[in-house]
Image: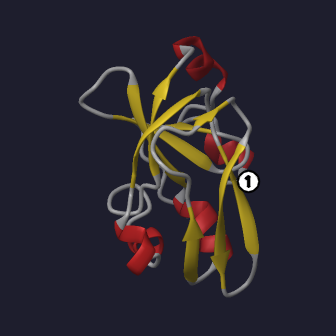
Amino acid sequence: MANIPSDLLYTADHEYLKATADADVFAVGITHYAQDQLGDIVFVELPRAGAKYSAHDTFGTIEAVKAVSELFSPVSGEVVEVNAALDSDPAAINRDAYGDGWMIKIRLSDPSQKEGLMSAEAYPKHIGE
């Protein structure tokens, strides 16, 4: 059974959006389910702070022993912080997807886009749990 925190929002592509102390900035990463499906993560390519994305744009890639996958922005906005610790320790995503394994922090340009994301109640149905 996947770990699905109730305070996050989820995408069909298995990314999450997590609130930060700044009401307009959210952490983005992949879900516990996604990291479990990928297996041991060995590399992650992330953008630089200042990069701007629209919802569903590719913002990076993640490489695991099993596969290489694209990462998709859950919302439109500007990257304000990148988790540089993942450069030397990409396995943090496997160990703590919702904590130390966050990937980017994004300042939303359209907060209403959050309404199009799945709740913690809807995401398990999406992954068949």
Q: Is residue 89 visible?
A: no
Tell whether 94 sits left or right of 77. Answer: left
Is the residue 18 above or below the residue 69 in the image?
Answer: above
> Which residue shows up at 56% across the image and 35% down it?
121
Quadrant housing residue 80 = top left
The mark total stands at 1
Quadrant housing residue 27 = top left
Indicate the quadrant containing the C terminus: top left, top right, bottom left or bottom right: bottom right
User: The residue under label 1 is which amino acid type?
Assistant: Gly
Is the residue 124 above or below the residue 53 in the image?
Answer: below
The x, y position of residue 55, in whole percent, is: 69, 30
Indicate the quadrant containing the N terminus: top left, top right, bottom left or bottom right: bottom right
The x, y position of residue 112, in whole percent, is: 58, 12
> Which residue shows up at 60% across the image and 17% down it?
115
Is the residue 55 above or below the residue 109 in the image?
Answer: below
| Disc 1 crowd, CA 10 A, few/some/many (<14, 14-19, 20+) | few
| Kind of element beneath mark 1 | loop
Q: Considering depth in this image, is 35 or 78 the residue closer to the camera?
A: 78
The x, y position of residue 77, in whole percent, is: 55, 27
Quadrant housing residue 40 = bottom right
> Which residue shows up at 54% across the image and 18% down it?
109
Q: Which residue is mark 1?
A: 128
Tell whether 127 sits left or right of 93. Answer: right
Q: Considering depth in this image, is 41 or 48 the residue closer to the camera?
A: 48
Q: Is residue 36 visible?
A: yes
User: Colour scheme of this structure image?
Assistant: secondary structure
